[in-house]
Amino acid sequence: MVNYAGGISVIINTDDSSGFKMTAEQLKAAITPKTKMLVLTSPSNPTGAVYSESELRALAEVLKDTNILVASDEMYEKLVFDNIKFVATASISEDMFERTITINGLSKSAAMTGWRFGYMASAKTELIAAMNKLQSQSTSNINSITQDAAIVGLNGTINEEVETMRVAFEARCAEATNLFNAVDGLSVVKPNGAFYLFVNIKKVSNNSMQFCKDLLEDQGVAVVPGIGFGAEGYFRFSYATDIETIKEGVRRIEAFVQKQK
């Protein structure tokens, strides 16, 4: 979308060693006089990384005295684990509140994926006005049935069900992480949120696209190549399914990996 709009994307690379989170130093080094926006995702798809309050404050300090906006994707905010507290980017300071465009929805937190309910929030009224113009000429509005269903997803009515879902995801995350780290040749950093693992396959293959294609053909297991996210040497595994299916999936992946040696 950045490229389509005539912008230039500057990628800040992260990996296992940093928990797939950029540092304030990396952000500072990447900023130029032409920088317009920082796109931040926490919890992250595909890595499950979650920025802490102190990490967000460090990033906020770098952005002080600039005109750089922050697009903060917080779609997975309800799905955080290990007693981690989700912190909204706009809540860090008054300065961050003014520069942040919060992006959220109910696809993940309320399991309303197919209903396509999303929203943005910003203190900049001129930005909201521009977005409204674009929205009204593209999709017009969310259908009325989805609007009605979204009410309980936003007013707290389903908080108990959301917590039940979060606890289930937390258990699946721990199980899947342990299973993958027991596979010779694979490794994964335990995520703090979302419902994905970003599995390191660098000891097995340096071509994630081919690895995923061959895995699908050989074992019938579908995962997403890391190169699709700009990170070669990984694949994304979703644990948005039951424990037994996760176990069977990892078992098949292990069998495939052993064939590659």
Image (cartoon, rainbow, N blue to C red):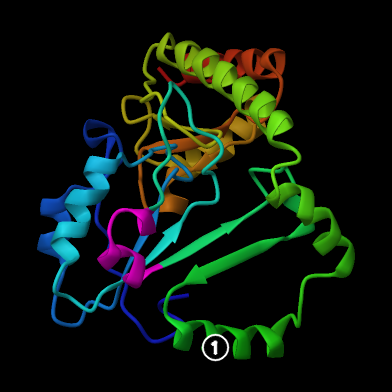
Q: How many marks?
A: 1
- Side of 163 where 142 appears, left or right: right
At x 53% / y 89%, what residue is drawn?
A: 130
Q: Residue at x 30, y 53 (%)?
A: 92
Residue at the right extreme, as displayed: 145
Q: Is residue 140 magenta?
A: no
The C terminus, quarter of image = top left
In the picture, residue 50 is in which quadrant?
top left
Can the viewer see residue 220?
no
Q: Nearer the viewer, residue 31 or 208?
A: 31
Q: Position of residue 152 (x, y in %)?
A: 78, 48
For residue 258, above or below residue 152: above
Residue linked to disc 1: 129
Q: What crowding class fits label 1: few (fewer than 14 Cα within 10 Å), some (14-19), or many (20 or more)?
A: few
Residue 175: x and y in percent read 54, 13
Which segment is the magenta one?
89-100
Disc 1 marks a residue whose amino acid type is Ala
Q: Residue furthest top?
A: 182
**Residue sitting at x 41%, y 76%:** 2
Image location (x, y in percent) of residue 104: 56, 57
Q: Please give left or right for residue 185 compared with residue 251 in the image.
A: left
State the image coordinates of residue 46 (x, y, percent, origin top left): 47, 43
Q: Is residue 95 magenta?
A: yes
Q: Secondary structure at mark 1?
A: helix
Mostly what secondary structure, the magenta segment?
helix
Residue 32 lies left or right of residue 116; in this view the side is left
In the image, residue 127 above or below residue 21:
below
Compared across the picture, whether 106 is left or right of 147 comes to left
Name the residue: 38% across, 29% down: 201
Residue 181 in sight from this viewpoint: yes
